[in-house]
Structures are given as C-alpha cells and as structure tokens.
Amino acid sequence: MAAQNKPLVTHIFTADPSAHVFEGKLYIYPSHDVAIDCPDDDNGDQYQMEDYHILSMDSLDAPCVDHGEVLHEKDVPWVSHQMWAPDAAYKNGKYYLFFPAKDKDGIFRIGVATCDTPAGKFTPEPDYIQGSFSIDPAVLVDDDGRSYCYFGGLWGGQLEKWQTGSFVPDAAAPADNEPALGPRVAELSDDLLSFKGAAQEIKILNKDGSPILAGEHDKRFFEAAWMHKYNGLYYFSYSTGDTHYLAYATGTSPMGPFTYQGHILEPVIGWTTHHSIVEYEGKWYLFYHDASLSGVNHKRCVKFCELHYNEDGTIQTITPYADEK
Ligand code: FUB
C-alpha cells in the first residue's frame, strides 16, 4: 500500500504528529522543529525545539490550521531546552498536553500542561511528573477510565541511562545478544497529573515467547511509542530508530506483554520516523513525518495516509513514495 506524500503545513517544520479526534475535528499535536543549521549527532543535539504549535483540520479535505504557539519552554519552570515529541489526552472536561524536555540538569523528563479547549494555550504544571524520565510520552485513556503513559527512547532519549532505576550518565547499552531495552509504561492518576506508581518496563516478545534482542535492530524498540486499540486488542507501535521502521506488537493488556507483529511503515526520507494511529469517521489513519520538505533530518514535515487492517487484525505495511516511482 502506498502513502500519500503531502505535508500538512509548509510554513513551519513539524514532526512527531500525535493525532486525536476531539470535538469532531482532527487535532494534531506535533513537535515544532527549529530551523537551525547544525550537523547531526547521535545525541540528537540538532533537535533544539523550543515550543509547541497545534494543528487541526475540520475534515480530511479541509485546510490544516495552525493555532500558533501554545506552550513555550520559557513558560515551564523546570525546563531547560529540547521540547521533543508531545501527545495530548482528554478526560473529565480537560485537555492535557504531555511533553518531554530536558530539565536544568540536562535530564529528559515528562511534563504536563492543561487547557479547557483542545487548541490551547496550555498552562504547565510547575514541575515534571515525578518518576518520569526519557522521551516520547503517549497516553491512552482506556475505555474503563484508567489511563496509561507510555514512554522511552534510546541514545539521545537517554533510556539506556535508566536501567538501574536511577540516572547513570555513562551506562552501557545491552549487548546485541541480550534482551533489548523495553519502553516504559506507568498508570496515570485519575487527574492525569501524576504516575500512580513506578514506571514498568514493557516486554515485547517474539511469537514463540522469546525476547527481542538488542541486536535485532529492525524489530527492537527505539523510540516513538504509540498505543491504540482495534477490536478490543492493544496495539503498541514504535520506531526502530537506526533501521528507520515503524513496527508494532499486540497484546490483551495495556501494560503488556506484547507480541511482535511486523512493520507498519517502511523507511521515509530522513533519519527519524514517528507516528500516531487514529480512527476518524470509520476509517483508520497513520500520521507520520519525513524530511522531504527540507532534505535535512531535523527540519521535518507531518503527513498522513490511510491505514488498512487485514481480516486477522494485522496491519498492512505502508510503502512511502510508491506512487512517485
Ligand atoms: O523530535 C525529536 C525526536 O526525534 C523525537 O522525540 C523522536 O521520536 C524523534 O522523532
């Protein structure tokens, strides 16, 4: 299946799109890439984002509206820099913006800001969520009212440094023949402002129950967690990072374990790949980004395409740019 190849907006660089249907409209919560000129490094220093803009569309054919800056790093007391991939949630009449950023010690944490409307502006909590670390929060408000925050990212996202439960600056990554590091999940409090307990590591297993190994780079978790439900099953999807796939695994519990199923999206233009999956008017859509607008890894643009399931619930792999060949 081929992907459409049209940026939603071209007047700013955007990435990491978390799409939700709120009040009957599609809202997209992306990162806002900064157009600085600098080389890439494995620590992600080229991603120096300072704020968030929210996008929305009245329908899939309607123009995409930029609601402007809704939160800036200077408005968040605990943040030093690098506001990376956000997500949003709605509960009890309030909208929540979850975002990772580096604290004053250079450690990635996850913060939350709230608003009465989906398009902001958002008011941040004074401190980050206690017990949070690393990057790329994705929040599921489940059908039973319980809510979960999924997060984590390797390399610049610092997940390797948290293997002991504390931040160890020079911690080594697992060897290729050891189980891969899993993303983390924490149940959220009823007001979505704190973790109910310590975050747990999520297990992503092969179909025979064995763990995916750190050396299996085209399957193992790297960053960009997303959770959605389809026909009552939990679908945990993520980026494989250095092999540039979006992959997914399924399970019967929101906390896992999840069984690896395959790839959702083949590599796009640019190093990173990050996405969300949303149902809108009875069809399913993948929102994703690439670097086609600039040709530069850290100046990205968000796009979407339809996503199709097979009858057995597996997802058909999407090939970007196939229509252009
Ligand atoms: O946008 C900055 C980082 O790049 C995100 O947090 C990752 O998921 C990757 O897309």
Image (tube, rainbow, N blue to C red):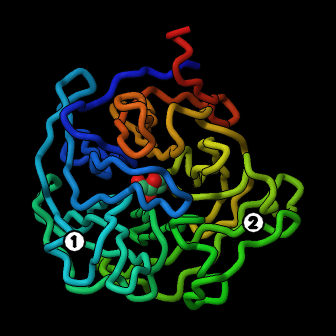
- Please identify, in this view, whether the residue under mark 1 or under mark 2 is nearer the observer: 2
Residue 27 position in % (x across, y down): 24, 44
Q: The C terminus is located in which quarter?
A: top right
Residue placed furthest toward the front: 38
Question: Residue 105: percent from the left, percent from the top?
Answer: 38, 86
For disc 2, the neighbor class at 10 Å (few under 14, some 14 to 19, many from 20) is many
Location of residue 63 by image quarter: top left
Q: Secondary structure at mark 2?
A: loop
Q: Residue at 21% of width from left, 42% of height from top? A: 55
Does 299 sit left or right of 212 as displayed? Answer: left
In the image, residue 76 above or below residue 271: below
Tell me where residue 187 appears, x and y as whole percent: 47, 77
Pointer 2 residue: 180
Q: Quadrant of the N terminus?
A: top right
CB under 8 Å between discs 1 and 2: no
Q: Nearer the viewer, residue 89 or 17?
A: 17
Q: Is residue 281 visible?
A: yes
- Where does residue 153 sit, x and y in percent of width and height? 55, 64
Q: Is residue 82 above or below residue 57?
A: below
Which element carries disc 1, helix, strand or loop?
strand
Amino acid type for the residue under numbered disc 2: Ala
Regarding residue 142, the answer to whether it shows in the image is no
| x 40%, y 78%: residue | 109
Residue at 22% of width from left, 28% of height from top? 59
Figure quadrant, ligand 1: bottom left
Q: Would you place residue 3 above or below residue 223 in this image?
A: above
Disc 1 or 2, which lies upstream in sequence? 1
Q: Determine which residue is flagged by label 1.
A: 113
Alpha carbon distance from label 1 to label 2: 32 Å
Q: Amino acid at mark 1?
A: Ala
